[in-house]
């Protein structure tokens, strides 16, 4: 066929080969290479099929690289059909912030990614079952409050240079910072302005102002020995009175009208010479 072959009815081609340099247009059913035939139809132009191509077990070969959007993309064809899809059920109407939709079986559900933040009505929490830390180059700014709850947890944070520095085992506060608590219970030692020693439950370096009552079985205090402060200490007790003073007691018996009371060797170094008072009480 040198021109355009137009077939309005069924066309059967046996073992012969037909060539055409024009277009082959088939509006009916074109059967090329029937059940008992191996014939070939060679078309140099375009082949237009309005119904379909029944190729049995054959395939499309020698397809050039596609140039236009409607060209064949590969040298194969699909000889099967796409079945009906199962409908997804349980599609959530909405998900909370930070969640994503995931498919489980035939259902869709809202899921929370691990190591992510979740907002609730009153707080934001981290979806993580282990520690949360900020390295030395990071910071955590909180205009409000921070709380840590749950057993076996400790809090480590730095608010600012005048705030609160807390970590497991110690609580440190810089000038200008505040710690508010209803009860403070500890099994170790506490140091304020200094590191506590192992022998003292509370050590304070600085002034202490008590607005209420200080109760103690004895009110002893320790000071450095005035003659050997590097190696010795003096233990004194507090006496109530309107003035600051040092009291020493002693007993002596008159001998030839005289009595001598021996004072400690550090008495002169510990007390001032002015305004000294000596009280004598005779005993009968």
Image (cartoon, rainbow, N blue to C red):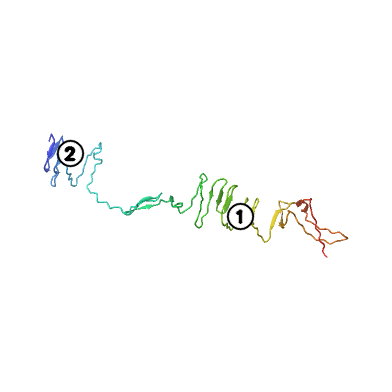
Depth-wise, is mark 1 or mark 2 nearer the camera?
A: 1
Q: Quadrant of the C terminus?
A: bottom right
Q: Is residue 221 visible?
A: yes
Residue plotted at (69% across, 55% down): 222
| Furthest residue toward bottom | 284
Residue 90 lies in what quarter of the image? Answer: bottom left
Residue 2 lies in what quarter of the image? Answer: top left
Q: Is residue 34 above or below residue 253?
A: above
Q: Is residue 134 above or below residue 46?
A: below
Question: Taking 152 as reference, is 203 left or right?
Answer: right
Residue plotted at (15% across, 39% down): 25
* Disc on the earlier residue, 1 or 2: 2
Question: Dot 1, how many residues are within 10 Å of its Cα: few (below 14), some (14-19), or many (20+)?
Answer: many
Residue 270, position as x, y percentages in the image = 75, 52
On residue 112, the disc is: none
- Frontmost residue, 277 versus 71: 277
Q: Under tag 2, what secondary structure?
A: strand
- Frontmost residue, 158 versus 216: 216
Number of on-image labels: 2
Q: Quadrant of the N terminus?
A: top left
On residue 190, the disc is: 1
Question: Taking 203 as reference, is 262 left or right?
Answer: right
Q: Under tag 1, what secondary structure?
A: strand
For mark 2, what is the residue?
Answer: 47
Gap between marks 1 and 2 measured at Cα: 95 Å
Q: Is residue 197 visible?
A: no
């Amino acid at each position: 066929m040198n021109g355009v072959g137009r077939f309005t009815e069924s066309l059967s081609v046996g073992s012969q080969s037909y060539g055409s340099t024009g277009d082959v247009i088939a509006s009916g059913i074109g059967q090329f290479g029937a059940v008992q035939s191996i014939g070939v139809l060679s078309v140099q132009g375009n082949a237009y099929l309005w119904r379909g191509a029944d190729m049995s077990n054959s395939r499309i070969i020698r397809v050039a690289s596609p140039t236009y959007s409607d060209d064949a993309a590969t040298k194969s064809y699909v000889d099967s059909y796409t079945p009906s899809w199962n409908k997804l059920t349980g599609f959530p109407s909405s998900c909370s912030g930070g969640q994503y939709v995931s498919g489980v079986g035939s259902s869709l559900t809202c899921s929370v990614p691990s190591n992510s933040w979740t907002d609730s009505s009153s707080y934001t929490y981290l979806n993580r079952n282990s520690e949360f830390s900020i390295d030395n180059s990071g910071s955590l700014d909180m205009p409000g409050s921070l709380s840590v709850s749950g057993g076996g947890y400790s809090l480590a944070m730095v608010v600012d240079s005048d705030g609160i520095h807390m970590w497991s085992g110690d609580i440190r506060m810089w000038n200008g910072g505040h710690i508010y608590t209803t009860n403070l219970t500890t099994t170790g030692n506490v140091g304020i302005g200094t590191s506590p020693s192992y022998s003292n439950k509370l050590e304070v370096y600085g002034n202490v102002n008590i607005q209420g009552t200080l109760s103690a079985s004895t009110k002893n205090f320790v000071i450095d020995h005035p003659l050997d402060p590097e190696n010795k200490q003096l233990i004194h007790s507090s006496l109530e009175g309107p003035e600051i003073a040092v009291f020493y007691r002693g007993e002596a018996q008159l001998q030839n009208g005289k009595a001598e009371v021996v004072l400690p060797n550090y008495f002169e170094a510990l007390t001032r010479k002015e305004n000294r008072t000596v009280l004598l009480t005779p005993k009968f």
